[in-house]
């Protein structure tokens, strides 16, 4: 109990001073996994397609192309799927990670406007208006209220936002494992990570967040995928190479030291029927600007 109290005192102090995992660490993390991110897309890309609905990607005029913002585009999965659909459109794809964007070179050749910039900086400074904004797996890296308001600022009248995001309950017990390791070696703690604060609890929470800004829900849902591994090293390797733990190595001054402790706890916490299991729980939704406000302020 004393260790836990000391850890939380240290974390609160760091949070108050804004010494938390931020853009610098997230950019570095995604630069590191740019070459292996395909592993995530091969397993979870099918769920991303839930927000790429052709029904909502139609221009109101035959003479105009629909304007799409691929927000925090990563290696360009969403943009490629839209191009494959053959929809007449103008796509702007933005991401903070320059290494992830290197995988988008082929998209630039197909007319996609690629921008290496922080997402909020782009939303704050662009003079463009978009008919559709699609955001795949990036919502928890932003303060949701601020992000939704900035989406709304750059949306056209009755424009649409599509979002898919991890939610509460994803990576079951992994946060507990990290906190336990932090408790046991407080001196090795560098910065806390507050990404879980921006995870929606579920579909209802995501709907409520958008309704508060006057968005109408067109579609929403939730799901979960479970993966199994033969040993804890493979499980942790999967989380690392897919970006699922992006930024977490910077929690510790010496991650390699903490890594051994993390693996030991995974052996205990995640073992069942001769396998080590991890879940990816997610929510998704498509929301229209200017809809009925059914949320509470």
Image (tube, rainbow, N blue to C red):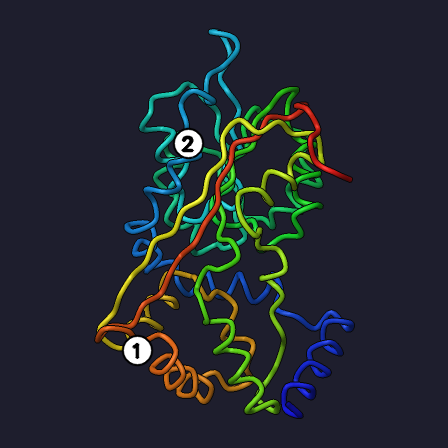
Where is residue 259, by image quadrant?
Answer: bottom left
Nearer-N-terminus badge (2/1): 2
- Write the residue at 76% across / 78% down: 13
Residue, x 51% and y 36% (percent of image)?
Answer: 285
Residue 61 placement (x, y as % from top left): 51, 8
SS category of the residue bearing label 1: helix
Of residues 289 and 37, the one nearer the viewer is 289
- Report the side of 146 relative to 76 (left or right): right
- The residue located at (66%, 40%) in the rendering is 148
Secondary structure found at label 2: loop
Q: Nearer the viewer, residue 58 or 272?
A: 272
Q: Quadrant of residue 195?
A: bottom right
- State the residue position of label 1: 233
Q: Which mark is residue 52?
A: 2
Q: Position of residue 56 (x, y in %)?
A: 47, 22
Q: Residue furthest front?
A: 273
Tell me whether circle 2 and circle 1 mark residues in contact (CB < 8 Å). no
Question: What's the distance in space between the residues labelled 2 and 1, CA to CA?
Answer: 34 Å
- Check the picture and name the quadrant holding the N terminus: bottom right
Residue occupying the point 50% across, 55% down: 97
100 and 193: which one is in front?
Answer: 193
Q: Which of the labelled discs sits on residue 109, or is there none?
A: none
Looking at the image, residue 104 sits to the left or right of residue 198; the answer is left
Q: How many marks?
A: 2
Residue 6 appears anywhere in the view: yes
Give residue 240's position: percent from left, percent from top.
39, 68
Relative placement, left or right, of 112 versus 12 is left
Quadrant location, the C terminus: top right
Q: Local crowd at mark 2 within 10 Å, few (<14), some, or many (≥20)? A: some
Q: Residues within 10 Å of mark 1 (few under 14, many from 20)?
A: some
């Amino acid at each position: 109990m004393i260790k836990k109290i000391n850890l939380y005192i240290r974390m609160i102090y760091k949070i108050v001073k804004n010494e938390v995992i931020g853009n610098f660490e997230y950019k570095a993390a995604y630069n590191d996994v740019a070459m292996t991110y395909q592993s995530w897309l091969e397993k979870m890309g099918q769920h991303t397609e839930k927000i790429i609905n052709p029904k909502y990607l139609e221009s109101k005029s035959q003479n105009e192309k629909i304007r799409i913002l691929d927000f925090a585009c990563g290696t360009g999965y969403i943009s490629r799927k839209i191009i494959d659909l053959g929809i007449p459109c103008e796509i702007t794809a933005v991401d903070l990670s320059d290494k992830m964007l290197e995988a988008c070179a082929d998209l630039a050749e197909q007319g996609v406007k690629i921008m290496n910039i922080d997402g909020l900086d782009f939303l704050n400074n662009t003079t463009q208006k978009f008919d559709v904004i699609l955001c795949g797996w990036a919502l928890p890296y932003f303060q949701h209220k601020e992000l939704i308001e900035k989406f709304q600022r750059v949306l056209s009248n009755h424009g649409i936002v599509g979002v898919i995001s991890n939610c509460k309950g994803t990576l079951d017990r992994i946060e507990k494992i990290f906190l336990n390791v932090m408790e046991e070696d407080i001196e090795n703690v560098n910065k806390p990570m507050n990404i879980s604060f921006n995870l929606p609890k579920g579909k209802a929470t995501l709907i409520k967040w958008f309704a508060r800004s006057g968005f109408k829900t067109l579609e929403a849902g939730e799901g979960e995928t479970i993966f199994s591994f033969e040993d804890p090293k493979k499980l942790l390797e999967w989380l690392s190479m897919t970006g699922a733990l992006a930024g977490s190595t910077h929690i510790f001054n010496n991650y390699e030291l903490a890594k051994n402790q993390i693996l030991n706890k995974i052996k205990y916490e995640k073992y069942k029927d001769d396998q080590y299991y991890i879940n990816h729980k997610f929510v998704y939704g498509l929301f229209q600007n200017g809809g009925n406000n059914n949320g509470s302020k």
